[in-house]
Amino acid sequence: MNECDIAVLGAAGRMGRMLVTAVSQVTGLRLVGATEQEGSPYLGRDAGEVAGIGPVGVAIGSQIQDGFASGRVAIDFTLPQATRDHLKRAVEHHTSLVVGTTGLTEGDVQQLTRAAQDIPIVFAPNFSIGVNLMLKVAAQVASTLGETYDIEIIEAHHRHKVDAPSGTALGLGRAVAGAMGKQLQDVAVYAREGHTGARVPGSIGFATVRGGDIVGDHTVLFAGEGERFEVTHKASSRMTFARGAVQAALWLNGKPPGLYTMRDVLGF
């Protein structure tokens, strides 16, 4: 197996540290770059030491060459404004990209689609193997139960998460809506307060919980007359997302330009 050169963008963040650790655990992956934003106190420090696994011989930098180079795969779990810049740099330097950033707009997704004409990109709302299986199962249930059941998507995350609903919850919503031949934007209900009136048939409701150190819980609830059917996934460690992302990076290495998902990586 040829080694795959990896750069972790945002290497000092919560997910960045997990990604550095995950890369070090997978045969065939080699960490060759790590970046942080200008002014970060972690610039110049060894990425492995910041991640808590000991020296790996890669200092965290802020320059283009620290993250982007031809033949390299960069993994980006940062913030939308950073990902927009990373996408431009990846195209300029012919760097393959794995994107797990949440809170991206429809315009951002369109930019990803355009960039994928020049470079290979894996983009997913969640890199957990279990969550991607959940997406498939929830869509199958929705196609069977259709509009005879009311659908609610409930998600919970830690107090520091800045976007809501989560990217995974929105991904579940799109999967469920698509299975019923609908567009999520036409049926989604994101907030309820006061006298809302009866539930609109065929709508998909969202409920958001933020608190403590919850890594990520997601449930798709199908509520019918006399019974409820639930599809649930609960993550207890961010490492499950990191391992999925490095699996995607290894799979992406050498692929032609295109916008791929974890379904492609996992062979669903």
Image (cartoon, grey):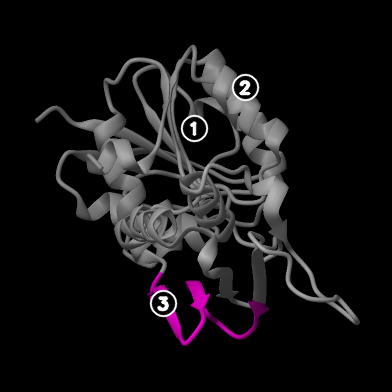
On screen, 17 above or below 228? above
Distance from label 1 to label 3 (Cα)?
Answer: 45 Å
Above or below: residue 28 compared with residue 245: above
x and y percent of residue 94 in the render? Answer: 45, 15
In the figure, is residue 225 to the left or right of 205? left
Q: Nearer the viewer, residue 153 or 165?
A: 153
Relative horizontal placement of residue 45, taking residue 268 as reference (left or right) = right
Question: Which mark lies nearer to you, 2 or 1?
Answer: 2
Stretch of the chain drawn in magenta: 209-237
Label 1 or label 3, whichever comes before in sequence order: 1
Determine contact: label 1, label 3, CB under 8 Å. no
Q: Is residue 219 magenta?
A: yes
Q: Provide the residue designation for mark 2.
A: 88
> Disc 3 vs disc 2: which is toward the camera?
3
For badge 2, the amino acid type reads Lys
Residue under label 3, please give it. Answer: 229
Q: Residues within 10 Å of mark 3 (few under 14, many from 20)?
A: some
**Residue under the image location 36 percent in, 61 percent down:** 134
Q: Which numbered disc covers residue 37?
A: none
Residue 177 locus on image (x, y percent): 55, 50
User: Between tags 1 and 3, which lies in front?
Assistant: 3
Q: Label 3 sits on what residue type?
A: Phe
Q: Is residue 252 magenta?
A: no
| Magenta span dominant secondary structure | strand
Residue 139: % across, % down: 41, 54
Q: Nearer the viewer, residue 109 or 247?
A: 109
Residue at position x 63%, y 59% in the image: 202
Q: Mark 3 or mark 2: which comes first in sequence? A: 2
